[in-house]
C-alpha cells in the first residue's frame, strides 16, 4: 500500500529565506507526483506536476525535483514571502492495487509559516 | 481555465438529516470526478470516484449507502450525506479530471460540513 510522508510537519522561517520541503513515497511505481498548496479552510491549488519520466519542474520561485527510484521529491522555495504561508501537500498518482483507474495518494502536508 | 466549484461552502445541519453537496466543472467537461474527505491536520482521503453516467466506485471503508454520489452530467457531480451524524463533520473536497489531460486533477474549494 502506497504511503506518502512529508517532513517536516511544520516549518517557520523568516522572510527571504530559501527553504526545502520533503516528500517520500514507499512505492516507486507512480505515474506522476504533484505539489499542491492549501490555504486554511480552502481547497487545493496545483503548484507543480512532475511526470515519472522527469527529474524536475520549475515555476517562478518554485522548483520541484523527483527521484522516483529512491521514492523522494523536494519542493524548493526561493526567497520566501509571507504570502507563501500555507500548507503544502505532496501527492503521487498510481494505479489501484487491483487495476483500474489510477488515483492520487496524499501526504499529510507541511505547514509553512513565513514571518515578516 | 479548469475551474471547479462547490456549493455550499459551509453547511450546518442537525443529526439525522441529509445534506447534498454539489461539484461543478465550470469551463471543461469532467470525465471523472473524485470526492475526498479531510479531517483536521490530516491528509485528503479519497472516498469515491465517479464517471459520468455510471455508478461510483467507493474506497474501502466508505459506506456507499451513506454517501450517495450522482454524476449526472459531464459538469456536475453531487455527494449526499444521508442521516448525518456528528462524526461526519469534516471538510469535503471534490476534484475533476478532464478528457484532454487525464493525468491532472483540478480541485474545488471544499465544503465544511458541521453536524450538530
Image (cartoon, coloured by chain):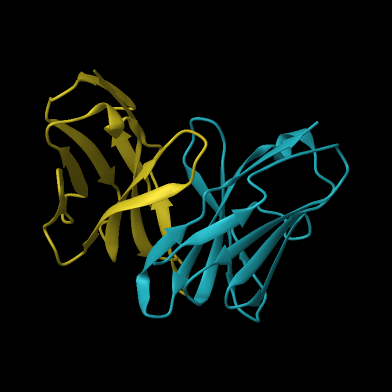
Chain colours: A yellow, B cyan
Q: Along the horizontal axis of the image, is A70 left or right of B113?
A: left
Q: Position of residue A80 (x, y in %)?
A: 18, 30
Q: Can see residue B60? A: no
Residue extending furthest right?
A: B16
Residue A99 location in percent, x, y?
45, 73
- Image quadrant holding the C terminus of chain A, namely top left
Which sits in the foreground, A55 or A84? A84
The image position of residue B86, as x and y in percent, is: 76, 33
Q: Is residue B49 left or right of residue B54?
A: left
In-front residue for pair B37/A36: A36
Residue drawn 26% across the image and 41% down it:
A23
B30 displayed left or right of B65: left
Whether residue B13 is situated above or below residue A80 in the rendered picture? below
Which residue sits at x=41%, y=37%?
A108
Left or right: B7 in relation to A102: right
Quick check: B39 above or below A90?
above
Amino acid at each position: 500500500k502506497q504511503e506518502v510522508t512529508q517532513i517536516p510537519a511544520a516549518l517557520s522561517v523568516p522572510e527571504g529565506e530559501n527553504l526545502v520541503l520533503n516528500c517520500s513515497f514507499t512505492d516507486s511505481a507512480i505515474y506522476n507526483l504533484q505539489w499542491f498548496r492549501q490555504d486554511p479552510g480552502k481547497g487545493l491549488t496545483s503548484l507543480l506536476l512532475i511526470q515519472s519520466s522527469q527529474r524536475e519542474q520549475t515555476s517562478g520561485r518554485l522548483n520541484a525535483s523527483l527521484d522516483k527510484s529512491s521514492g523522494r521529491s523536494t519542493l524548493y522555495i526561493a526567497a520566501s514571502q509571507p504570502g507563501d504561508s500555507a500548507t503544502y501537500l505532496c501527492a503521487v498518482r498510481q494505479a489501484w492495487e487491483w487495476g483500474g483507474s489510477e488515483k492520487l495518494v496524499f501526504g499529510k502536508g507541511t505547514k509553512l509559516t513565513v514571518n515578516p | 481555465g479548469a475551474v471547479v466549484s462547490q456549493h455550499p461552502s459551509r453547511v450546518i445541519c442537525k443529526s439525522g438529516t441529509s445534506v447534498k453537496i454539489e461539484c461543478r466543472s465550470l469551463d471543461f467537461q469532467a470525465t471523472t470526478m473524485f470526492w475526498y474527505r479531510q479531517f483536521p491536520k490530516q491528509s485528503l482521503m479519497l472516498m469515491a470516484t465517479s464517471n459520468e453516467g455510471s455508478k461510483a466506485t467507493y474506497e474501502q471503508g466508505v459506506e456507499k449507502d451513506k454517501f450517495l454520489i450522482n454524476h449526472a452530467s459531464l459538469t456536475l457531480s453531487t455527494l449526499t450525506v444521508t442521516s448525518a451524524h456528528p462524526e461526519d463533520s469534516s471538510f469535503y473536497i471534490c476534484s475533476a479530471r478532464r478528457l484532454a489531460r487525464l493525468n491532472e486533477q483540478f480541485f474545488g474549494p471544499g465544503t465544511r460540513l458541521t453536524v450538530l
